[in-house]
Image (cartoon, rainbow, N blue to C red):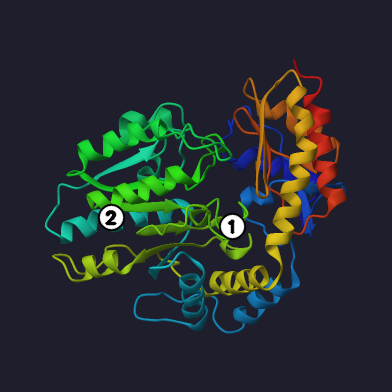
Amino acid sequence: MLSTTQLTEFDREYLWHPYTSFTNPSPVFPVRRAQGVHIELADGKKLIDGMSSWWSVLHGYNHPAINKAITDQLHQVAHVMFAGFTHEPAAKLAKTLVEITPTGLNKVFFSDSGSVAVEVAMKMAIQYWYSQGQAQRTTFLALKQGYHGDTFGAMSVCDPHSGMHHLFHQSLTHHLFAEAPSCKFDEKFDERSFANFSQLLQRNRQKIAAVILEPIVQGAGGMHFYSPVFLQRVRELCNQLDVLLIADEIATGFGRTGKLFACEFANISPDIMCIGKALTGGYITLAATLCNDKVSDGISNGKSSVFMHGPTFMANPLACAAANASIDLLIKTDWQKKVARIETQLKQELEDCRTLAAVADVRVLGAIGVVELKEAANVAELQPKFVELGIWVRPFGKLVYLMPPFIINEQELRQLTSGIKTVLAPMA
């Protein structure tokens, strides 16, 4: 086993961390183990996790039910190619996903990660129109301030100017971008906020393969919460103009917003849905792209009957076993009560941040709490301060936010919210 010094040295010499300079990296903290909502560092210090490891760890770390599901599956088959084979964990998971997602999403395509799920969705939309003899429909209409992943297709439908991938703009396929919804989640809907989207879709419908958006919560593009009526209007117009709708629920799925899936706020069903992150409870990378019969039948009965995608680790049995256990835990517990409790406490305790000099806004939805700063946060400066207070909070851009595991208790959540106030209070 490596000593802490060796681990730190090897990390510094060989590892390139996400969104980090190799020559001038942000500090990293060696992890020894994790249990419940706590991440234990190599020096024994325990941190309350406010990030759910990038929004994925619903039930906390080292959960016995998920551990057992993976261990049991490990003794059966850890992996087998999904071309020509099938297995029980994948079949059960697909059936469950069809049952719990919006009505009409009847087909499930598994992949490796959220970004790849978006790539699959985009390919489904393009291949659907190709199969219908409309090969010109290859453009996507997305929302400004949106984020859909780090691979090239996914990057191409992220905000091309203000998003984190703007430097790749000239290398990406160029798509259409409507103004981000200006109607906030808890405000009366203003029909004028839909005008720009409506005009773009109507004007370009003959070349658009699909609309792609994050329902209700625009995540890494700014943590904006918008009106469900906007999403209803999108679904209505897509139906009217015969345009496919892709809902990216990778960050919002599995109860994070207070609904099992954020589309439920608008009572709509997309043609294609992407899920990931919390799918396995944060254990193993797995994602899925679901579609309705219109899409699956359109591809299968058209010019190109075979859907052209096939990841090597598609429907990995260990990952599917973890997902089955995680969803079972979620559905059989009163997750709505847990999320409602978290939401109430976040609203009460983060509101004080609104008076701080560095803070521009505070907003909460479900188990998501956001403190938006007036200027971008210096992660290298703030991160050690949070660690010193025994909490794991990792800002990005102007956002200091919380997405804790659902099992967090009142005292642990209060330590997170009070820690944010303590660190932000001295900032000008």
328 displayed left or right of 190: right
Please name the residue shown 80% across and 42% down the image.
416
User: Disc 2 residue type?
Assistant: Ala
The image position of residue 23, as x and y in percent, is 60, 28
Can residue 29 be seen here? The reply is no
The C terminus: image quadrant:
top right
Q: Nearer the viewer, residue 166 or 349?
A: 349
The mark total stands at: 2
- Could you say whether the residue bearing mark 2 is in a helix, strand or loop? helix
351 displayed left or right of 267: right
The image position of residue 228, as x and y in percent, is 49, 46
- Could you say whether the residue bearing mark 1 is in a helix, strand or loop? loop
The image position of residue 371, as x and y in percent, is 68, 32
Q: Nearer the viewer, residue 17 or 163?
A: 163
Circle 1: is it few (<14), some (14-19), or many (20+) Cα within 10 Å? some
Report the residue marked by disc 1. Answer: 259
343 displayed left or right of 321: right
User: Disc 1 residue type?
Assistant: Lys
Please name the residue shown 47% across and 57% down the image.
267
The N terminus: image quadrant:
bottom right
Circle 2: is it few (<14), some (14-19), or many (20+) Cα within 10 Å? many
